[in-house]
Image (tube, rainbow, N blue to C red):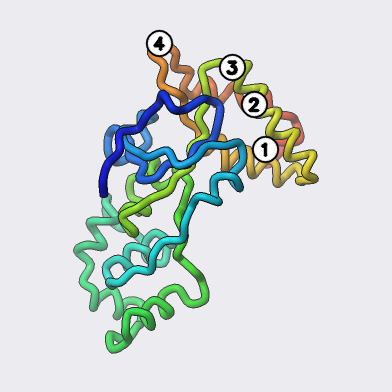
Amino acid sequence: MKKIEFEYADIIAPCTVLIRNLQFEDDESATGIIAFGEIIASGKTMNELMKHVPKPEPLNDLKSLMKLAGREGIIECNEESFVDEINSYPEEDFLRDLDISADLDLEQIEKEIFLEEDPYYYNVNLEPYYLDNLITDLDVFATSYSTIFFISNDKIEVKEYILERIDALKNKGYSDYKIFQIIHYRYLENMLEIQIPGMHYGSEMLEYIHTILPAEITHFYNL
């Protein structure tokens, strides 16, 4: 995988950005500073960005299928590093533990593991980068597509952006609960600041955003 240095100068926040092969500075978790990643597209809605996300190519070895099973929660991690655990997990033990015949070919094994589910998609959320023991798409497919909601350090600008997105969703007829899900999971859970020296709100900005959310949205945090 060719690493492309991330260009913060190309980001005009606030906006949501689709990044291929995202890698944070510490190489393992989301520290807030991106070292590598190719900017594919930016926009206000997830639908705009998802048009640029391809479907992963089918995997052609059992060990990769095992990692995909780990990403999907079919097998669980008992060690600090899920990837290391799977790499040391004998394939015959994996098949026996899932009660799968070793005589099946790879395509049949895949059907036995995932049943009717289609596991071939990119997880565009940041969650695996925050939790060290989760498996990322880079681990499975050697490629990843991630979305990040970048904010500026201007509180008024961020407030106007968030409220504008809420109004746009209301105008589309979305329920309050659906709007809460979109704002929380697509924006706030995937939020990072533009790194401007001397201007780092950090958790203060996230707390501020919660104070400006309409009551019908914050209501769902209290359930």
* Residue plotted at (35% across, 45% down): 21
Question: Which numbered disc, 3 or 2, marks the residue that appears first in the sequence?
Answer: 3
Q: Which mark, by number, is residue 222?
A: 1
Q: CA distance from mark 2 to mark 4?
A: 23 Å
Q: Answer few, some or many: residues within 10 Å of disc 4's Cα (few below 14, many 20 plus, some between 14 and 19).
A: few
Q: Which mark, by number, is residue 26?
A: none
Q: Kindly identify the amino acid type of the residue bearing the numbered disc 1.
A: Asn
Closer to viewer: mark 2 or mark 4? 2
Q: Which mark, by number, is residue 155?
A: 3
Question: Which numbered disc, 2 or 1, marks the residue that appears first in the sequence?
Answer: 2
Q: Answer few, some or many: residues within 10 Å of disc 3's Cα (few below 14, many 20 plus, some between 14 and 19).
A: some
Q: Nearer the viewer, residue 218 or 5?
A: 5
Q: Which mark, by number, is residue 198?
A: 4
- Residue identified by numbered label 2: 161
Could you tell me if the residues under marks 3 and 4 are in contact, i.e. CB atoms within 8 Å? no
Rendered location of residue 130, percent (x, y)? 39, 41
Closer to viewer: mark 3 or mark 1? 3
* Residue plotted at (46% across, 22% down): 202
**Label 3 residue SS:** helix
